[in-house]
Image (cartoon, rainbow, N blue to C red):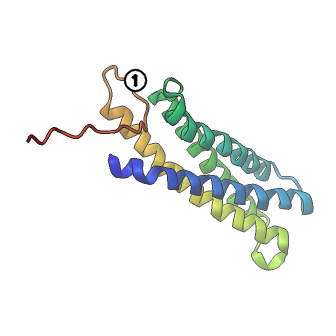
Amino acid sequence: MALAETLLLPVRAVQALFAIIVLGLLADVTTNWYTASEVNFLIFASVWTLLAVAYLVIAPLTFATAAHKYAVLVAESLTMLFWFAGFIALADLLTKIGCTSRQGKACGESIAGTVFAAFEWLLFLGTTALAALHVWRTRGGSSEPAHAMKVQPTPYQGA
């Protein structure tokens, strides 16, 4: 699990970056085109993700009691479900209205937002699986934070 914990912070950075990209793209779509509920939902998912990533990064490092393994799993699962529902709904809308990248800036931005949302879902699918695996491995009463950074003591080598 050490490899997963080592790679977790860069994955969180990519999750935050993709959320900002989707937020920017779809905010421009709502400004220049129209505000479909699917677009609004992905804007919500982007803002939610920024808050969730802040919690998932800061809580285990500074507030270990706030980073209970079930709280981390719920935050991961909800965020993953939001991205899944959002990118599927927007992709369906764009298909129904026949939106292609050749039909203007708003359609191109909507398609790009959908693609980034799908990649965001994949990232959260992976981190949710890691959180669920942690909950499974520590079942039986342990309330240790999901991604606790621990210093392992070096065994005494002798004289």
Q: Position of residue 15 (x, y in %)?
A: 59, 53
For the point 34% across and 19% down, the residue is: 141
Vertical position of residue 78 compared to residue 30: above or below: above
**Residue located farthest toward the front when viewing the structure as drawn:** 159
Vertical position of residue 103 compared to residue 147: above or below: below
Q: Is residue 111 visible?
A: yes
Q: Where is residue 149, by image quadrant? A: top left
Query: Is 52 positioned to the left or the right of 71 in the image?
Result: right
Query: Is 9 positioned to the left or the right of 84 in the image?
Result: left
- Circle 1 residue: 143
Viewer-side residue, 17 vs 64:
64
For the point 87% across and 56% down, the residue is: 30
Query: Is 82 positioned to the left or the right of 66 in the image?
Result: right
Q: Position of residue 111 (x, y in %)?
A: 72, 67
Q: Secondary structure at mark 1?
A: loop
For the point 49% across and 34% down, the residue is: 60
Q: Position of residue 114 (x, y in %)?
A: 68, 61
